[in-house]
Image: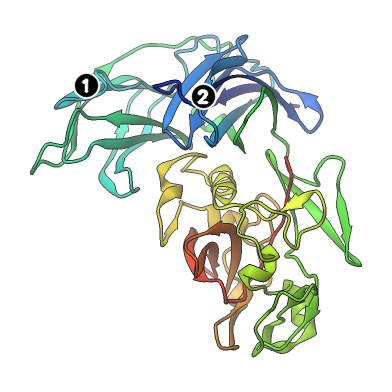
Amino acid sequence: MKARFLLLFLVSGIFSGTMGQSTIDFTFTAVDNATYVKLDSIKVMNRTHWSDTVLYWPDTTLTYEITPGDTMLYVGYAMEFPVGVQSIGNRAAQFQLSQSYPNPVRDQAIISMSLPSKGLVNITVADIRGKVALNFDRKLQEGTHSFIFHSGNERFYILTGRWNGITQSMKILTEGPVSGKTCRLEYTGVENWNPTLKQSLAATDLVVQESGILDSPTTNETYTFQFATNISCPGTPTVTYEGQVYNTIQIFSQCWLKENLNVGTMISGTQEMSNNSVIEKYCYNNEVDSCTKYGGLYQWDEMMQYTTTQGVQGICPPGWHLPTDEEWKILEGAVDSQYGIGAPEWDIEYSNRGFDAGTNLKSISGWYYGGNGTDRFGFSGLPGSYRYDGGGFFGSGDFGSWWTSSEFDSYAAWSRYLPRNGPEVGRYCDYKVSGISVRCLRDY
């Protein structure tokens, strides 16, 4: 039996000005299935204004002014230790990336990073568009390491540090772009320290888990992080919908249908779907058996039931909804071993992103030549193919694509892509008239 220690980060925002704002109380707790889990610390991220704060146990309530419409991302980390290790005796014995000083930065700032043991450290700095401006890799020993950050020709940067599968990010503001200069990072040395643990613990013994919740709160809220994963959703192991039974899968605080949606009446791939009060679907090569194996393929408007409001129920069962682009990012960060929830990596557009999220989301079987899926979290992503504009099909066994309910523009919407052998997850936009697979996410 393993003892559990929870390190929970939340990311939130403190805003300037008061117009349109209201004071809201956030209260946080956590469970593993139905068992209470103690919160050690909490970090809250405002995805609208890119600001954050941290709380430490026993302070698990946050009060501040919030602007209506702000999207908040709450991210939790749970650490499992071997038998006999109940907690870390010294808070310094944690991986910690400290906020730059000063901030905003005029020309340069000091950054520190604490490592509880030696290991490979990666630091990336990206601009507001997600473009990586610099990448730093070095094996560093235990201790608190110092860096000097030299700003470049940008007003805003996101610096992300990674060590032993743990990721922390921070925002760096500059007082103004420095024309003709590029940002750079200068390593200046280490101050050694010897943290005290209740017993000796190798960094490789840790099992780090993440949990994330996305919301746009308007009133006082109590949030419960779920740290169970790769089990049926507690209380909802299956869902019966339109004559079919779907299994469910809990991946931290998200509960997904384990299979692609297969609902509606099959029409030919040469036909366009229409708003006729009948749910329509495509099956690969117009074969019913393909829908049985991979689920149906749907045009975006049909999936959305002819609205553009992201996160709607659409063609999903009652109590479930079509996942947004941001909710897919939470899933990706939760299952990737290198890039955590809320990392700038997931905001990169038109690209395969992540380290191994794709491998961890793909099913073990069902791919040409076996594929490389490990299905580590039970998502069981299958290569359901693609119906392109004009009526043809391609990709069965070779890749899988899934819609999000988030528009790109009036002609296209964001989607996700899992290739047969690649380890990453693609974030692309597809024309709404394309036929793509659909997964449903339970309402929070």
Sequence-earlier tag: 1 or 2: 2
Spot the residue most to the left.
180
Q: Is residue 151 above or below residue 434?
A: above
* Residue located at (80% from left, 25% from top): 35
Spot the residue most to the front.
19
Q: Is residue 97 above or below residue 436?
A: above
Quarter holding residue 9: top right
Q: Which mark is residue 189?
A: 1
Judging by the rendered image, the residue that carries numbered circle 2 is: 21
In this rendering, the label closer to the viewer, 1 or 2: 2
Q: Position of residue 5 (x, y in %)?
A: 64, 21
* Residue located at (41% from left, 61% from top): 351
In three-dimensional space, the C-alpha distance between marks 1 and 2, rounded to whole angstroms, equals 44 Å
Q: Which mark is residue 315?
A: none
Say if residue 297 shows up in the picture: yes
Q: Position of residue 100 (x, y in %)?
A: 29, 22
Mark 2 Cα within 10 Å, few/some/many (few <14, many 20+)? some
